[in-house]
């Protein structure tokens, strides 16, 4: 693409950003002609590193390279470098951030054939009189009125200390405390629980950029996932780039992806049906226990080797990310596999059993708490049009594709890492989950004003039952759909 003229560094600034308004910025880039420069998605994709970073938001192209060092969310700014970040930008930032982004405007997107799966469009709901805009206004007013920081909550720091202590103590007690296999097995199960808590609480908030105001601390908390065996980098690629931006969109959301044929699971009627799917509600209960094994020992390496996680094209490692990925894997293998093999009083066979107990408990807890949010009969799945569009506003799609459970339960809020307030989490992923109990009534009020459905199960067990009931129903070849375009 044609080289852009330099920014006007003599203009007044706020936080290092020129205060020229968006219109003046466009005029400065077009020589006063008023016709913005055009960039194809392929051209934007070239600029995909922290040192050269362009993004697409609402059909406009921005060069945010110089803002990277100041981005409050640290590495979250390049999680989808060179790509369409519309949904991520809207959901992670307060409304005032648009004015900051405008200063980095360099042109418009020129869509060409083949962009249908690169730039996925929802109906615009970031304007007055739309559900999502009203939700954002109401939630931002709540934080302003209560003088709270959306990314800070004292209970989060306390639970982090408890969870990390639990991981360390139970890891030691599982492998080294005693030669009693029964006692060690109990600690192995507890170890699995604490590992799952890292997954749903600490790393989950951190890898959404929703934990604290210090970027160094945020990054350290992101790496707690690497410390227990899985890759935070790959998690962000799958969960943030794919799942959160395009929740329950068939063929796009990697959390509901399936193989073209012979997939073990079928979650909606547009996915291929196999003869064994009528039994998936039985065998998946056991298969979910392999989730942690699969993530730590296979999925991360497969994503690195193939460069893809379903629809998501995995971003290239920076030098630091590569070192963290391989270094963390080595450290984890050393303390979790090598040291017990060398110094534990247990035999190799018993060690294998203890590791299996730990990983199965972790897998079950993670799978159960995540699956009840999006794979139940009371949520919707979406299918793209030929033009790569969803006929619904993004905020409404999150409401319709998510289900809550156990509102008002302090235990489930903490134990599930706020996943029991899934709607709040998807609409406001950059907010610490300890705030979700206060946000849910606000969102519910707005949804009621717009006559929109809000799915809530009274208990976790009701939600879990709904998940397996849905698996049983959709496993039948004649299942009646609830899929919307």
Image (cartoon, helix red, strand yellow):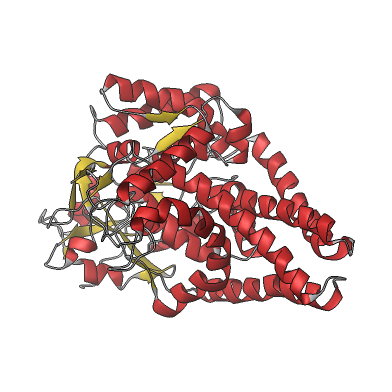
| Residue 449 vertical placement versus 302 (above, below) | above
Asked whether 143 or 299 is in front, the reply is: 299
Asked whether 429 or 401 is in front, the reply is: 401
Horizontal relation, residue 418 to residue 475: left or right: right
Number of marks in the rendered image: 0
Residue 352 coordinates in the image, percent (x, y): 71, 70
Is residue 374 visible in this depiction of the protein? yes
Horizontal relation, residue 240 to residue 170: left or right: left
| Residue 384 vertical placement versus 431 (above, below) | below
Which residue appears at 26% of the width and 37% of the height?
Answer: 126
Quarter holding residue 378: top left
Residue 368 coordinates in the image, percent (x, y): 52, 47
The N terminus: image quadrant: bottom left
Residue 292 coordinates in the image, percent (x, y): 57, 61
Is residue 9 visible in this depiction of the protein? no
Which residue appears at 76% of the width and 70% of the height?
Answer: 351
Horizontal relation, residue 116 to residue 305: left or right: left
Which residue appears at 36% of the width and 55% of the height?
Answer: 256
């Amino acid at each position: 693409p044609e080289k852009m003229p330099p920014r006007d560094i003599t203009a007044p600034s706020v936080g290092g950003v020129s205060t020229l308004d968006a219109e003046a910025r466009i005029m400065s880039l077009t020589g006063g002609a008023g016709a913005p420069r055009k960039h194809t998605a392929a051209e934007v994709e070239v600029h995909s590193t922290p040192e050269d970073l362009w993004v697409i938001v609402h059909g406009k192209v921005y060069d945010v390279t110089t803002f990277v060092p100041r981005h409050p969310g640290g590495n979250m700014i390049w999680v989808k470098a060179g790509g369409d970040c519309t949904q991520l930008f809207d959901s992670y930032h307060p409304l005032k951030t648009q004015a900051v982004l405008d200063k980095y405007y360099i042109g418009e997107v020129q869509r060409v054939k083949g962009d249908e799966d690169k730039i996925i469009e929802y109906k615009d709901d970031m304007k007055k009189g739309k559900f999502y805009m009203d939700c954002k206004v109401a939630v931002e007013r709540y934080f302003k009125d209560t003088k709270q920081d959306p990314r800070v909550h004292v209970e989060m720091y306390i639970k982090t200390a408890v969870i990390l202590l639990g991981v360390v103590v139970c890891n030691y007690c599982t492998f080294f405390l005693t030669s009693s296999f029964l006692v060690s097995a109990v600690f192995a199960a507890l170890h699995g629980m604490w590992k799952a808590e890292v997954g749903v609480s600490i790393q989950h908030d951190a890898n959404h950029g929703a934990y604290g105001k210090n970027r160094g601390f945020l990054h350290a908390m992101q790496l707690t996932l690497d410390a227990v065996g899985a890759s935070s980098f790959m998690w962000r690629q799958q969960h943030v780039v794919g799942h959160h931006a395009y929740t329950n969109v068939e063929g796009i959301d990697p959390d509901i992806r399936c193989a073209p044929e012979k997939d073990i699971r079928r979650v909606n009627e547009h996915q291929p049906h196999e003869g064994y799917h009528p039994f998936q509600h039985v065998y998946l209960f056991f298969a979910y226990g392999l989730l942690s094994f699969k993530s730590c020992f296979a999925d991360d390496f497969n994503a690195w080797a193939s460069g893809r996680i379903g629809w998501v094209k995995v971003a290239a490692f920076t030098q630091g990310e590569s070192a963290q990925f391989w270094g963390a894997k080595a450290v984890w293998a050393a303390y979790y596999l090598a040291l017990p093999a060398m110094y534990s009083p247990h035999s190799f066979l018993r060690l294998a059993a203890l590791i299996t107990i730990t990983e199965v408990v972790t897998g079950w807890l993670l799978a159960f708490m995540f699956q009840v949010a999006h794979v139940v009969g009371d949520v919707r799945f979406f299918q793209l049009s030929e033009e790569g569009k969803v006929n619904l506003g993004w905020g409404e799609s999150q409401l319709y594709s998510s289900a809550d459970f156990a509102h008002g339960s302090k235990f489930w809020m903490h134990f599930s890492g706020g996943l029991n307030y899934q709607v709040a989490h998807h609409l406001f992923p950059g907010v610490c989950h300890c705030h979700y109990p206060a946000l849910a009534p606000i969102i519910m009020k707005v949804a009621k004003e717009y006559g929109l459905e809000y799915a809530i199960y009274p208990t976790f067990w009701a939600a879990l039952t709904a998940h397996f009931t849905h698996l049983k129903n959709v496993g039948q070849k004649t299942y009646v759909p609830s899929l919307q375009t």
